[in-house]
Image (cartoon, rainbow, N blue to C red):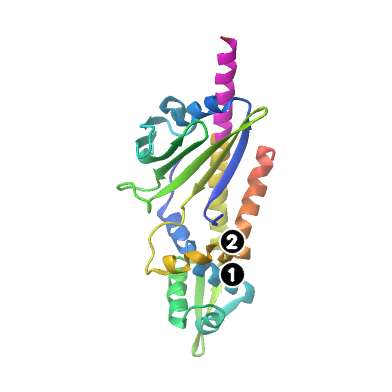
Amino acid sequence: MTTRSDEADRLWAALGDPMRIRLLDLLLERGEATASTLAGALPITRQGVSKHLNVLERDGLVTAHRSGREVRYAVREERLDQARAALARTAGRWDTRLTAIKKMAEQAAKSGADR
Amino acid sequence: MAPDAIEREILIDAPPRVVWSIVTEAQHLAGWFSDEAEIDLRSGGRMLLTWRGHGTYAGRVETVDPPRLFAFRWQTREGELSDTNSTLVVMTLEAEETGTRLRVVESGFATLPWPGDARARYAEENSKGWLTELGELHDYVTRIVGASSGR
């Protein structure tokens, strides 16, 4: 099986940026935060933070809710769980493949030695 | 390692040259990887991997260094094969007293294009930037998958 969905691709793309990973880490640490407070903890501008938060929100990794004049962001942990599960599935597929390689190689080595 | 990479390994009771032929030859690839396989085993060589019921996916041989290192890219979605629609598989074979240690790293799940030039700007921070939560991915994967492979 080789099917990888667009959904998974988008998830990986969203996670593929170190600054977005740092944003997620900060959000996980704080529970929720605004773009301004996040920018205060990172070496990029508030506009830069907002851009990354938009990507994360678009791909479902964070939620945004308005609180008075502020927009506060929080992590959707179930999406992170999906990323974990996708990696685990990939790892599982490789274990299956490696086990098949092992069987095939050991059989080939054995029949070669018998000849 | 980046959080979008998978690393697995296995110990095989066969010499590296035997393992090498299993991982690189079309007839064997069609046994452990796809249902049908074609491969032009040289750097830049084309691969065609067919899974019955799913279709044919293109691949490209990246590195051929027998019997130690075999690397290839394979397509994750339709279209011409490129670095942004494929993942990289690196297989290393290490001779051990009792056979061969075969290690595989598949990476690049997060290489799809995204807006701006932030990737280049922050590439430097990769090594220290990936923090706790996602850093745990590997431990997690190693734990649950490792349990079944007896590591």
Magenta span: chief secondary structure: helix
Check disc 2 and give the amino acid type: Leu
Which residue is label 2 attached to?
B134
Q: Chain of mark 1?
A: A
Residue A1 shown left or right of residue A80 in the figure: left
Give the quarter of the image for residue A84. Answer: bottom right
- Residue bounds of the magenta highlight: A98-114
Task: Point out the image quarter for the C terminus of chain B.
Answer: top right
Q: Position of residue B115 (x, y in %)?
A: 37, 67
**Compared to A95, does A108 lie above or below?**
above
Q: Position of residue A45 (x, y in %)?
A: 46, 81
Asked whether disc 2 touches disc 1, contact meaning CB atoms under 8 Å apart, the reply is: yes
- Helix, strand or loop at label 2? It is helix
Give the quarter of the image for residue A113. Answer: top right
Q: Among all residues in the image, which is located at the extreme top? A: A115
> Viewer-proximal residue, B61 or A20?
B61
